[in-house]
Amino acid sequence: MNKVITINRQYGSGGRDIGRKLAEIYGVPFYDNELISRAAKESGFAEAAFENAEEKATNSLLYSIAMGMNVFSAQEIGYAGLSLDDRIFLAQASVVRKVAESGPCVIVGRCADYILRERDDVVNLFIIAAVDFRIRRAVEIDMLPQNKAAEIVLKKDKTRANYYKYHVGERWDNVLNYDLAIRSDLTGIDGTVVALKAYLDAIESL
Amino acid sequence: MNKVITINRQYGSGGRDIGRKLAEIYGVPFYDNELISRAAKESGFAEAAFENAEEKATNSLLYSIAMGMNVFSAQEIGYAGLSLDDRIFLAQASVVRKVAESGPCVIVGRCADYILRERDDVVNLFIIAAVDFRIRRAVEIDMLPQNKAAEIVLKKDKTRANYYKYHVGERWDNVLNYDLAIRSDLTGIDGTVVALKAYLDAIESL
């Protein structure tokens, strides 16, 4: 398998697990949200900026100072005038580009489909599932409280859709953004992996 | 294969051919736009009404008379006050429901996914492809003139999107309407069929 596979997914659809299984099957690296974030931080992007972002702090002078201390300074790569969120996105995008350059892999989230849109070796997948299935998984796997799970699942969808809309400028649920979009609950996680493997192998053999 | 498969598709994506091949593989009936329209006509819906609709004639008194002459009269099934387009849609919807009731099959177009939304044995597919691939197919297979093909392909997409929006009330390209959406040009038509078969078999085996 000589492709870079990107995966967008509805919360609770099992997209991350599906990505990890595909990476195992093909023996290629797997990068999820957390790994990309960590790599972006370790690449020199001020840790403090990330922490503050997560806390939604608003001391922008402090951020500016933190930003000025690391390799992604405004002067060096033209980040001047960008919000902290945008700077974090750009640092992560830089990581996404680097891992894609190192060869075939699976990347989950982070608008990787958009970031890598100029490459011709990328296959973009979208994993969806019926909301009941996703709520059940959220309770069983992510340990969400039963009485809050439905609300949290729908809120997470909205957050991901907004994140995509903000950074990409397009609708997250537009089928035309993806090479293959698939509902995981009709087949279960393993059945979805089988179908995706059939598609990826067919691409390979063309 | 014990499902009713519906296929929506971008013009030139090969969705119809893919549907026919799936029907052959599973040994189930195949219904395309043309067959559904013909069956709706033959079921008693006045032929004249269809012909006039295609010519976009506006003599609504004539239509009303034509409508009154067939089994789908306004009184019988509550079509009163509906436009001719709506009446045709309802007659076709009735055919779609009937063929779905007779057992597993493949139905292309006609918003069958929406018409059959209450059934739990339906799998909804959407076939897309890069516009260059679709233009090439439109020229080679549908014999569109080279210099008009791009324009016609884009116009057909728009017509299908509008048709769906009008009758279903939702965006045609919303990934959440489908169980699986797939780009046919990365794998070619036969590769797409292989991937879809893997998905349908995985559903079956769950």
Image (cartoon, coloured by chain):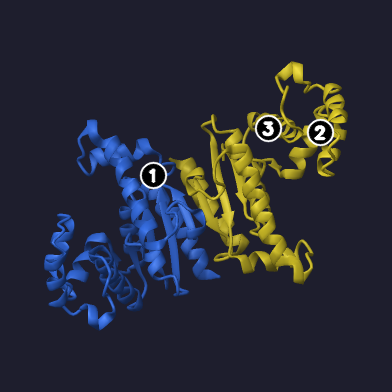
Chain colours: A yellow, B blue
Asked if labels 3 and 1 touch by Cβ distance under 8 angstroms, the answer is: no
The three-letter code of the residue at mark 1 reads Gly
Reading the image, the residue beneath label 1 is: B188
- Whether discs 2 and 3 lie on one chain: the answer is yes
Reading the image, the residue beneath label 3 is: A93
Asked if labels 3 and 2 touch by Cβ distance under 8 angstroms, the answer is: no
Left of A76 or right of it: where is B175?
left
Residue under the image location 33 percent in, 56 percent down: B163
Left of B28 or right of it: where is B40?
left
Q: Residues within 10 Å of mark 1 (few under 14, many from 20)?
A: some
Reading the image, the residue beneath label 2 is: A41
Residue under the image location 35 percent in, 74 percent down: B100
The three-letter code of the residue at mark 2 reads Lys
The x and y percentages for residue B180 are 48, 57
Which element type, helix, strand or loop, lies under badge 1? helix
Tell me the subunit letter for badge 1: B
Distance in Å between CA atoms under marks 1 and 3: 31 Å
Residue under the image location 50 percent in, 54 percent down: B175
Quarter of the image holding residue A6? Answer: top right
